[in-house]
Image: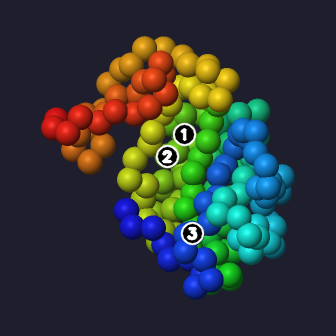
Amino acid sequence: MSLPLHAQTRPVPEAAVLEGLPPVRDVPVLTSWTVDDLRWALRQDSAVFFVLTNTRSLSPEGAATRNREVVRALHAASAAEGTGYVLAGRGDSTLRGHFPLETDVLAADLTELGAGAPDGVVLVPAYIETRRAHGRPRETGRLSGRRCWVSGCASRVRCPASG
């Protein structure tokens, strides 16, 4: 997937990260997601910002609705600012929450809005900064025609050169 072009004054697109918040510094953090809030975030001098959605505390239906609200508001804010965006959904390291519902909703809405479907989903059941890892490496399927593995112990995804 090619990344959308950002405003001419910036070399990289803004990245909006939904859900959990790792320790961060000098990064905008939003607790609401109106179009105006997201326009403000897109104008900040930061390549990334977080939108705290707290979907893990919601029912599956509530989580789906909230994800749709954020994606649609971000898309509208991006259009109003004349800039692109990259969207990343972030869950917790123990994979609690509404997976694969949330990633499916994000992919469907991005596609419907014309932003394109994600290239894939990467699961890393680890929180590297605290040396927390869960489980053993396991095959998770194929990405771009190649087998991919999630390694909680090594905290990385490994895709062999051949399938």
Marks 1 and 2 sit apart, C-alpha to C-alpha, by 5 Å
Q: Amino acid at mark 2?
A: Asp
Q: Position of residue 5 (x, y in %)?
A: 50, 77
Which dot marks residue 101? 1
Q: Are marks 1 and 2 in contact (CB under 8 Å)?
A: yes
Does dot 1 land on a helix, a strand or a loop? helix
Q: CA distance from mark 3 to mark 1?
A: 26 Å
Q: Residue at x 81, y 67 (%)?
A: 37
- Along the line of sight, the residue nearer the viewer: 144 or 33: 144
Q: Quadrant of the C terminus?
A: top left
Q: Which residue is mark 3?
A: 13
Q: Nearer the viewer, residue 128 or 18?
A: 128
Rendered location of residue 160, percent (x, y) = 23, 34
Residue occupying the far left of the picture: 162
Q: Nearer the viewer, mark 3 or mark 1?
A: 3
Q: Image height check: is 154 above or below 9?
A: above
| Mark 3, other Cα within 10 Å: few <14 / some 14–19 / many ≥20 | some
Q: Locate residue 117 relative to residue 65 in the image: left or right.
A: left
* Residue at screen point 56% across, 19% down: 133
Mark 2 lies on residue:
104
Label 1 crowd (10 A; few <14 / some 14-19 / many >=20): some
Q: Is residue 128 above or below residue 50?
A: above
Q: Quadrant of the N terminus?
A: bottom left
